[in-house]
Amino acid sequence: MTVSSEEWLERAQKVLVDGGSSASRGPRVFKPYPPYMVSGSGARMTDVEGREYIDWMMAFGALPTGHAHPSIVAAATSAIETGSHFAASTPVEVELAEKFCQLVPAAEKVRFSSTGTEAVMAAIRLARGFTGRRKIIKFEGHYNGWSDAVLVTTNPQPVDTLGHPNSPVGIVDSSGIPPGAIEDTLVIPWNDIEILRRVMKDRGREIACVMTEGIMANIGVIPPQAGYLQEVQKLCQEYDSLFYLDETCTGFRSAPGGCAELFDLQPDIVTFGKALGMGFPLSAIAGSHEIMSGLAWGNVMHFGTMNASRLPCSASLAGLNLMSEDDNAGFKLLRSTGEKLTAEIQSLFRSQSRHAVICQGDGPLFQLFFTDRPSIDCFRSYCRDVDSSKYNRFANLLREHGVYITPSNTLHSASSMVHTDADIELTIKAFEKTLQQLD
Ligand SMILES: Cc1ncc(COP(=O)(O)O)c(C=O)c1O
């Protein structure tokens, strides 16, 4: 007998917090209840009740080659059959590092870890160790993982406000973070170079790194203003602070070399996660020989039992080889598919007038905003101008028509290189029906 998603949720809530392992997959955003999935193939996923969805989340962007791609299945199967992890270095780790450095211009050397959060923690420690400075600058609405020092002003609906005199405008996004953990974190608005210029003028010589996403991908999708990131980089150079690009969302998605390649930047440190692992836990910290040598012999300490284990490295190498074949044809397809979908959604929204709604995106990343504004350019505008409850209703209704996008307006949706024109067409029809249903 089939057990429904609703019944799975009931069972799950007895043993798993919120019925799952991350709030962004749980009943708070997936209404009336989250679908429990049993399989995925290509661009589709199937839930416990046999309902199929066109998947535009792709495991939060971790599956640029789609579900169960044969090349990745073969590489992962072979790694499992012959030993998934050793207390030893492996050739595949070296081959993957070579491939990484070939694709990512900012990377002369790389260190692997398992999750984006870990990579960010190591990168911040490295920046502090390398510069001998304490302070870091992060931006409002940028989510850089859930570690203490950066969990400040990431959420439009803060759960707790401790406040602290040394964090000028930061709002702490979790209970359990002591003021000391964030006293060296300065949080400022993004996409406004004058604000950063003023802060750097006052405190630039104290700043170990300015950390930024290349495209804001955790408050929907908000691209940088033209030239903004170049100016951030210049200011970092002027004050000998490190320019740190967190490419967890954009790495191996926006371009082979991430936003650094897309916007022609030369970051001092980059971190990658999500797409790097091709569905397995893998992240990376990378930079020049000089900066990365800070990690040598545990000078700046970074350890990890699961670092560069053979299974994710094998899957990653297979995926990156696949995407970079034929002059990066897979990467180009990933981008063009996202662009095609975004353009079709925009055109649908323009031609129907009942709801004020826009679609913002860049390549494979996209998000909808129910708003009267022509665009959403920063965190504050998102908080002020976007009807995220309406979006949540839209995304949850859309699933009834077989299309799966994130129901959380702060996250983003994602294309893969295996979505087809037919998937786009079906998605647009589902959007049309859902807009008609929406009150
Ligand atoms: C920009 C950015 N940095 C870091 C992280 C943390 O990565 P993880 O969820 O793998 O810990 C995320 C996750 O969404 C992210 O978007």
Image (cartoon, rainbow, N blue to C red):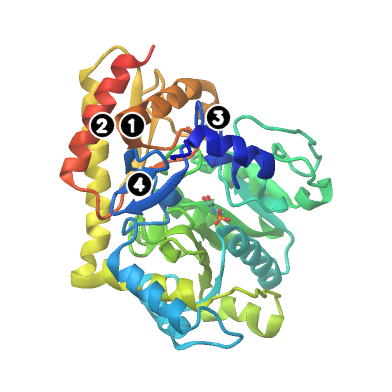
**439 relative to 4 in the view: left or right:** left
Question: Mark 4 or mark 2, which is nearer the start of the sequence?
Answer: 4
Q: At x 72% / y 51%, what residue is drawn?
A: 148
- Going by the numbered disc 3, the residue's amino acid type is Arg
Q: Secondary structure at mark 2?
A: helix
Question: Mark 1 or mark 4, which is nearer the start of the sequence?
Answer: 4
Question: Mark 2 or mark 1, which is nearer the start of the sequence?
Answer: 2
Tag 4 residue: 45
- Going by the numbered disc 2, the residue's amino acid type is Ile
- Going by the numbered disc 4, the residue's amino acid type is Met
Closer to viewer: mark 4 or mark 3: 4
Tag 3 residue: 380
Q: Secondary structure at mark 1?
A: strand
Report if residue 349 is visible in the image: no
Residue 345 circle label: 2
Quadrant (top left/top right/bottom left/bottom right) for the N terminus: top left
Mark 4 vs 3: CB contact within 8 A: no
Q: Eyeballing the image, is 102 above or below 201?
A: below
Question: Which class describes the residues within 10 Å of circle 1: few (<14), some (14-19), or many (20+)?
Answer: many
Mark 2 sits near ligand 1, with its Cβ under 8 Å away: no
Q: How many angstroms separate mark 4 from mark 3 (CA)?
A: 35 Å
Tag 1 residue: 359
- Residue 332: where, in percent of width, then height? 23, 58
Q: At x 37% / y 64%, what residue is drawn?
A: 257
| Residue 253: quadrant of the picture | bottom left
Quadrant (top left/top right/bottom left/bottom right) for the C terminus: top left
Closer to viewer: mark 2 or mark 3: 2
Most foreground residue, 226 or 331: 331
